[in-house]
Image (spheres, helix red, strand yellow):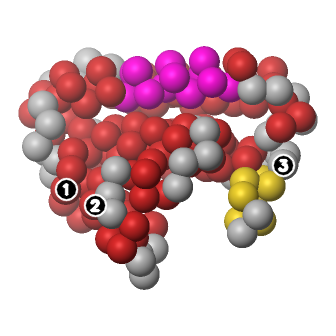
Amino acid sequence: MAENESTPQSKAELVARITREWDALQAAIAGLSEEQLTAPGDGGWSIKDNLAHIAAWEQYMLAAVLQGQTAAQALGVAPETLQGLDDNGINDILYRRNRDLPVPAVLDAARLSHEQVMQTLARTPFEDLPKQFKPDRPEPVIEWVIGNTYDHYREHRLYIERLK
C-alpha cells in the first residue's frame, strides 16, 4: 500500500481503488504498438512482460489465497522447485513461463485475470478479507488482495510510464 493510504474499510472502497488503478494501467498501455509493448526495458522486461507478471500474481492470489491451494499448486510447479525461492525467484519462473507469449495472448490473460479477481471479490464477504491467510502465514487476506491488485497495478504502471 502507498505510505499515505490506509487499508480499505469496505468492499466498495476496495473495489473503487482496484478499479481506479486498473483503469490507470489500461490508460498507460492504450494505443501502444506491439513494438512498444515488446521492447525490453530496464532489467530486460518489456511492458508485455509486466502485464503477464501482474496477471500471473493475480492468478496466484486467486488460487492460493482465496481458494486455498498450496503455493506449488497455485504456481503449477513442483514443491521442491519453490524451496528456498523468494519473490524474485518466483518472478523469474513466471517471466520464463510467459516471455514468449504473443502480445494478444498476454493482453487477453491480463483482462481475464482482472475480471476473475473482480468476480471473486464480488462473491467474497468483506468480513473474510481481514482474516489470516493461513495458520502459518500471519498476513491478512486483504493485504494479499491489495498487493496483487491496486498496489501492483500502480507499481507496474509507474514503470511502464517510464518505458514509454
Rate crowding at label 3 as few (under 14), some (14 to 19) or many (20 or more) other CA atoms within 10 Å. some
Q: Which mark is residue 38?
A: none
Report the Cα–Cα distance between label 3 and label 1.
33 Å
Other-residue count near label 2 (Cα within 10 Å), few / some / many at <14 / 14–19 / ≥20: some
State the extent of the magenta-drawn residues as a range: 110-121
Q: What residue appears at the point 44 percent right and 27 percent down from the top-left corner?
A: 113
Depicted 122 relative to depicted 84: above or below: above
| Depth check, front residue: 56 or 161 | 56
* Residue depicted at 49% across the width and 57% down the height: 71
Up-down relation of residue 2 to residue 123 (above or below): below
Q: Which residue is mark 1?
A: 96
Between 137 and 117, which is closer to the camera in this rendering? 137
Which residue corresponds to mark 2? 93
Residues under labels 3 and 2: Cα distance?
Answer: 29 Å
Instruction: Label the magenta part by its dominant secondary structure.
Output: helix
What amino acid is labelled 3 in the image?
Lys
| Residue at the image position 75 percent from the left and 26 percent from the top | 124
Measured as percent of width and height from the top left, residue 97 is found at: 21, 50
Please say if the residues under marks 3 and 2 sit with CB atoms less than 8 Å apart: no
The circle on residue 131 is: 3
Q: Within the image, what quadrant is residue 39 found in?
A: top left
Residue 59 as seen in the image, left or right of residue 145: left
Residue 85, horizontal then vertical, whole percent: 41, 75
Instruction: Give the residue drawn at x 84%, y 46%.
Output: 130
For marks 3 and 2, the one nearer the N-term is 2
